[in-house]
């Protein structure tokens, strides 16, 4: 779903980049490709785009992935702004600032620095250097390129990352807390299965470890919702799978609760994020009459070599390499639950399991399905928004991923879509989150995730 100019103008400006003194922000290409709405996110400050950035956008516009879509979206927005006046002279924006496109200023820069200006990055630096000499207002280069920020610093230019969608990842909401209660309250909780709790800053569906003040060795697991702490309801196996630690129990509680429509699971490799989501999905679609017509499993394609289109075969054959981890987990669950040959073939032959890559999910409407978006740390916040707007009535969606294992060139642990989603929806009653900590895949996998 493309962003309209009206929608962007109505969004809340970014935090942390607006001040009392008017500033000139020079935007790098990667900022625009990361967030097409970034040109409208600086309130009453002036936005300057080097003409070399427009050239870079033109090179990216033919791509069929998210970067290509963002390049085309930015170009459409700039073309729409031309109706308000010439971009070379500056166009006023509703927030009070302006946007203009500047030619690269070579002379001032060449006289001061012996740097090759045949690269786009250095031409952007040249413009920033020239503007800093020509104005008393602060000039700030905004780029997601770490090396370009370093080069700017060497030249005495101020440079910073784009902060609109960054979260404080070390303090990211974990979905689990600890409460100290009296021994009598703990005994009452065991007997009644619930207890009143005023909230005290707890988020909906937050899990709590209740500990006795008199005897800390006594504890209980609870989930908070609407002023009450309740016992966990999960008992037994879920499609042959057993929770191996308390975080996995918490995750299955959310995954099996049809009232929690959005679930986010974060954890390092081997903590069980994907297999827990798959087990819950198979249980809901094949074992329960929960109203889900299909299990839809999707993941982003972030190629390290050739793109998806260069692989041979039909769509199923093309996506097989990217979906192999899903096949591995499904095969394991089949062996644990049914322990019969041909189980995998049966599951797919029913038509109730669909594997899809995000390349093909745009524009769809997905009602009454149990949706799993794996490896979602490789999604931008804009991509996560696009996926959520595809979810139809009666559907449930799960996002899993490890923000510390990102392959996307413009994302990090603080700016990826998964971390952003966890931070933004933690207070919503239809959402729940758990950060899984302990690796359960194997001793080798745990050692690798912990030490390497």
Image (spheres, rainbow, N blue to C red):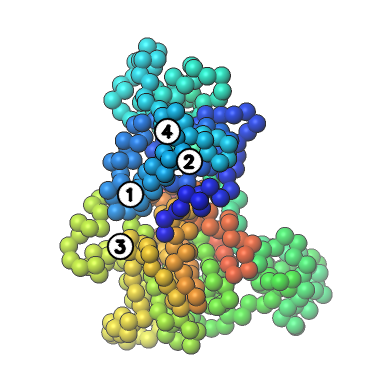
Residue underneath mark 1: 68
Q: Is residue 356 visible?
A: yes
Residue underneath mark 3: 322
What's the CA distance linking mark 2 and mark 1? 17 Å
Residue that protrudes farthest toward the top in the picture: 111
Q: Place residue 13 in its image quadrant.
A: top right
Circles 4 and 3: CB atoms closer than 8 Å: no
The front one of 82 and 181 is: 82
What's the CA distance linking mark 4 and mark 3? 43 Å
Q: Which numbered disc, 3 or 1, marks the residue closer to the eye?
A: 1
Q: Which numbered disc, 2 or 1, marks the residue closer to the eye?
A: 2
Place of residue 144 in the rendered image (x, y in percent of width and height, measured from the top left): 44, 39
Q: Residue at x 56, y 41 (%)?
A: 94
Residue that protrudes farthest toward the left in the picture: 312
In what element is the residue under mark 2? helix
- Within-10-Å neighbours for mark 4: few <14, some 14–19, many 20+: many
Going from the N terminus, do you reach mark 2 or mark 1 first? 2
What's the CA distance linking mark 3 and mark 1? 21 Å
Going from the N terminus, do you reach mark 2 or mark 3 first? 2
Q: Which numbered disc, 1 or 4, marks the residue closer to the eye?
A: 4
Q: Which numbered disc, 2 or 4, marks the residue closer to the eye?
A: 4
Disc number for residue 39: 2
In what element is the residue under mark 3? helix
Place of residue 333 in the rendered image (x, y in percent of width and height, measured from the top left): 39, 78
Going from the N terminus, do you reach mark 4 or mark 3 first? 4
Going from the N terminus, do you reach mark 1 or mark 4 first? 1
Disc number for residue 87: 4
Q: Residue at x 31, y 23 (%)?
A: 117
Q: Is 438 situated left or right of 225 in this image? A: left
């Amino acid at each position: 779903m493309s962003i309209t100019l009206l929608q962007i103008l109505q969004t809340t400006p970014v935090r942390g980049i607006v001040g009392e003194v008017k500033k000139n922000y020079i935007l790098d290409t990667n900022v625009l490709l990361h967030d097409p709405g970034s040109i409208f996110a600086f309130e009453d400050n002036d936005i300057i785009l080097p003409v070399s950035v427009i050239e870079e956008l033109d090179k990216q516009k033919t791509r069929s992935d998210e970067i290509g879509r963002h390049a085309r979206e930015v170009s459409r927005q700039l073309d729409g702004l031309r109706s308000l006046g010439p971009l070379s002279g500056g166009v006023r924006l509703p927030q009070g600032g302006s946007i203009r496109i500047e030619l690269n200023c070579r002379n001032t820069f060449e006289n001061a620095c012996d740097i090759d200006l045949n690269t786009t990055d250095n031409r952007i630096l040249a413009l920033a250097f020239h503007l800093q000499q020509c104005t008393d207002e602060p000039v700030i280069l905004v780029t997601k390129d770490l090396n370009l920020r370093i080069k700017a610093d060497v030249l005495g230019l101020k440079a910073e990352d784009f902060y609109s969608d960054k979260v404080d990842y070390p303090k990211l909401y974990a979905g689990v807390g600890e409460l100290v209660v009296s021994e009598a309250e703990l005994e009452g909780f065991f007997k009644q299965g619930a207890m009143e709790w005023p909230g005290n800053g707890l988020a909906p569906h937050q899990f709590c470890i209740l500990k006795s003040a008199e005897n800390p060795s006594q504890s209980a697991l609870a989930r908070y919702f609407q002023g009450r702490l309740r016992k966990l309801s999960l008992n037994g196996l879920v499609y042959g799978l057993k929770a191996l630690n308390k975080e996995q129990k918490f995750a299955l509680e959310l995954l099996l609760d049809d009232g929690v429509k959005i679930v986010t699971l974060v954890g390092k490799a081997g903590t069980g994020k994907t297999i827990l989501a798959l087990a819950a999905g198979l249980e809901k679609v094949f074992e329960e009459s929960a109203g889900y017509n299909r299990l839809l499993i999707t993941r982003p394609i972030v190629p390290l070599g050739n793109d998806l289109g260069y692989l041979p075969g039909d769509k199923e054959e093309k996506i097989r390499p990217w979906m192999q981890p899903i096949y591995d987990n499904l095969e394991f669950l089949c062996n644990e639950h049914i322990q019969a040959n041909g189980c995998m073939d049966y599951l797919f032959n029913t038509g109730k399991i669909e594997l899809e890559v995000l390349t093909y999910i745009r524009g769809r409407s997905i009602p009454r399905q149990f949706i799993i978006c794996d490896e979602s740390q490789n999604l931008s916040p804009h991509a996560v928004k696009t996926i959520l707007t595809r979810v139809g009535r009666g559907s449930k969606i799960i996002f899993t991923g490890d923000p510390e294992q990102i392959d996307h060139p413009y994302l990090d642990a603080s700016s990826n879509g998964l971390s952003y989603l966890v931070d933004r929806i933690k207070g919503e009653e239809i959402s729940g989150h758990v950060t899984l900590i302990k690796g359960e895949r194997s001793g080798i996998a745990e050692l690798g995730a912990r030490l390497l």
